[in-house]
Image (tube, rainbow, N blue to C red):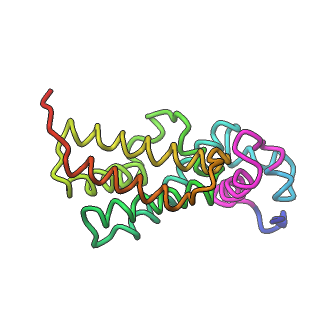
Amino acid sequence: MVISPRKGLTTEIVVKAAADLADEVGLPALTVSAVARRLGVKDASLYSHVKSLDDLRTRIALLAAEEMTDRIAFAVVGRSGKDALVAFADMYRAFAVERPGRYAATQLPLDPAVTEGTAAMIRSVELTHGMLRGYGLVDPDLTDAARLLRSAFHGFAVLESNGGFAHPRSLDDSWRRALDALHHTLVHWEAHGV
């Protein structure tokens, strides 16, 4: 995508181009210069839209969180229990595998002052907690279960993306068995007061 200087850049165009490039080359390989080349402009043109590479990565993380949350929300609407868990997990995995640069950005430690109150972050927590409340969980078990799911989904998706599963058994079959086990765990979650 080359942007005509007459059309001008917007922050949204810069961030979207950077996110697309991160998906292609990997977030660690992303540079401001590479984004500028992608857009057909000089590096300096980007600095009126983003402060630094760190700022650009933060903006990619926020964009990706919004995109991922929208996909998950669409998948889980009207579902509960195992149906909701599977829909949530499938969208999580698909996003992580299909959008690896964006997904990597969502895993960056972000400044809470920047992310606090952002709609995507709030919706992400609400979606996760809403799905888990369908299992009758309340805090602190709700938080513990959310951490378990995130760890399982993240681990599987990252290993899959990196070619970490060499066994010939179908990844989809293993994924389904993992979700069956997580569902069983959530149904039989024993509340432990703090």
Is residue 124 rendered to the left or right of residue 79?
A: right
Q: Residue furthest front?
A: 168
Q: Which of the pair 166/69 is nearer the observer? A: 166
Q: What residue span does the magenta drawing correspond to?
A: 9-34
Q: Quadrant of residue 87?
A: bottom left
- Residue displayed at 25% across by 62% down: 81
Q: What is the magenta segment's predominant secondary structure?
A: helix
- Residue displayed at 67% across by 39% down: 51
Residue 173 visible to the viewer:
yes
Give x and y (percent) for residue 89.
Answer: 42, 58
Q: Which of the pair 6/108 is nearer the observer? A: 108
Image quadrant for the C terminus?
top left
Q: Residue furthest bottom?
A: 78
Residue 66 visible to the viewer:
no
Give x and y (percent) for residue 150.
Answer: 42, 44
Image quadrant for the N terminus?
bottom right
Q: Which of the pair 21/72 is nearer the observer? A: 72
In the image, is residue 110 above or below residue 73? above
In magenta stretch: residue 16: yes
Is residue 124 rendered to the left or right of residue 110?
A: left
In magenta stretch: residue 173: no
Is residue 165 rendered to the left or right of residue 22?
A: left
